Image (cartoon, rainbow, N blue to C red):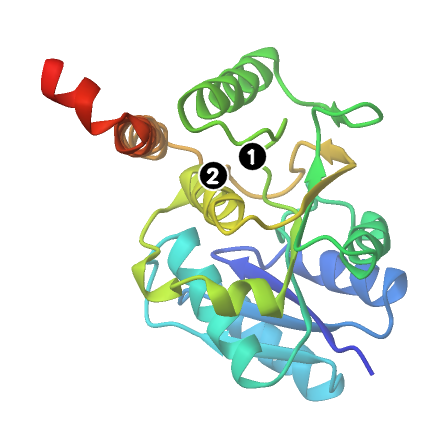
Amino acid sequence: MTRDLVIIPTYNERHSLPDTLARTRAAAPDVDLLVVDDGSPDGTGTWADEYAGADEAVHVLHRPGKAGLGRAYVAGFAWALDRGYHRIAEMDADGSHHPEDLPRLLAAVAGGADLAIGSRWVAGGRTANWPWYRQLLSRGANAYANGAIGLGVRDATAGFRVFTAAMLQRIDLARVNSQGYCFQVDMTRRVRDLDGIIVEVPITFTERLEGVSKMSRQIVVEALWRTTAWGAERRTRQWRQWWGRVPQALRRRS
């Protein structure tokens, strides 16, 4: 039997998490959930413990403090792999991702994908209640990532996605230290570098109704410089591959 897990990172999500968990349990009743809480001062972790005590499909992983989205997901991946889950999903706690879309993402992986991305920017995907400048930032970030790294993905920054455990086991998670939207780009490029099959599934992304956005200047700057560095690394690798194919006689003339 295939075992599926949804990882939901939290930091001060006490008001939005109950609805997210309830909707996810209704949309995918056979899926387990892991709340990864970074020591939320608002009591999110304590509430999640109480909820998990009444629902054996819900688990909670406590971390000592806010260490970033990437670290939370890597910790969740390790927890899932240690327990033998087969398909492992990422989903936000704030209601921006619709749990009702989860079965389609799981189905895409069941159909042969190594990574299924819930995409806003493919045909059928859309955003709701998102200000124009956030849409511009997202589209610009994806265009830059594709130009620099050659991902071939319309929504590499999307945070609603499903991986196979087999693919995560092939990735050296200990070396993944990116954060924020950059983490999603990083994981996408790692799957692409391993020749993994990536499928984009159209979803509706809704601007969060509760809490405060985690977007910051630091997250944007990190994404920019890391993507630029990965792009430079890719170009260097391509040049070396090309140079290695040049006959020795031509090399001596250059």
Q: Which residue lies furthest to the front in this view?
A: 249
Give the residue at mark 1. 156
Determine the image quadrant of residue 174. bottom left
Residues tagged 2 and 1 counted as in contact (Cβ below 8 A)? yes
Secondary structure type for disc 1: loop
Q: Out of 46 and 82, give the one closest to the viewer.
A: 82
The image shows residue 144, relative to residue 187, as above or below, that is above
Q: Position of residue 182 (x, y in %)?
A: 41, 39
Q: Compute the Cα span from label 2 to label 1.
A: 5 Å
Mark 1 burial class by Cα count in 10 Å: few <14, some 14-19, many 20+: many
Residue at 78% across / 36% down in the picture?
203
Give the residue at mark 2. 185
Viewer can see residue 21: yes
Q: What residue type is labelled 1?
A: Ala
Q: Where is residue 92 in the image (x, y as percent from the top left)?
A: 61, 50
| Apparent side of residue 45 relative to residue 96 in the rendered image (left or right) | left
The image shows residue 102, relative to residue 1, as above or below, that is above
Residue at 85% across / 50% down in the picture?
104
Q: Position of residue 160 (x, y in %)?
A: 65, 47
Mark 2 burial class by Cα count in 10 Å: few <14, some 14-19, many 20+: many
| Apparent side of residue 9 relative to residue 131 in the rendered image (left or right) | left
Q: What residue type is labelled 2?
A: Val
Determine the image quadrant of residue 153. top right
Viewer can see residue 41: no
Of the numbered discs 2 and 1, the one sitting upstream in the chain is 1
Q: Out of 178 and 149, give the one closest to the viewer.
A: 149
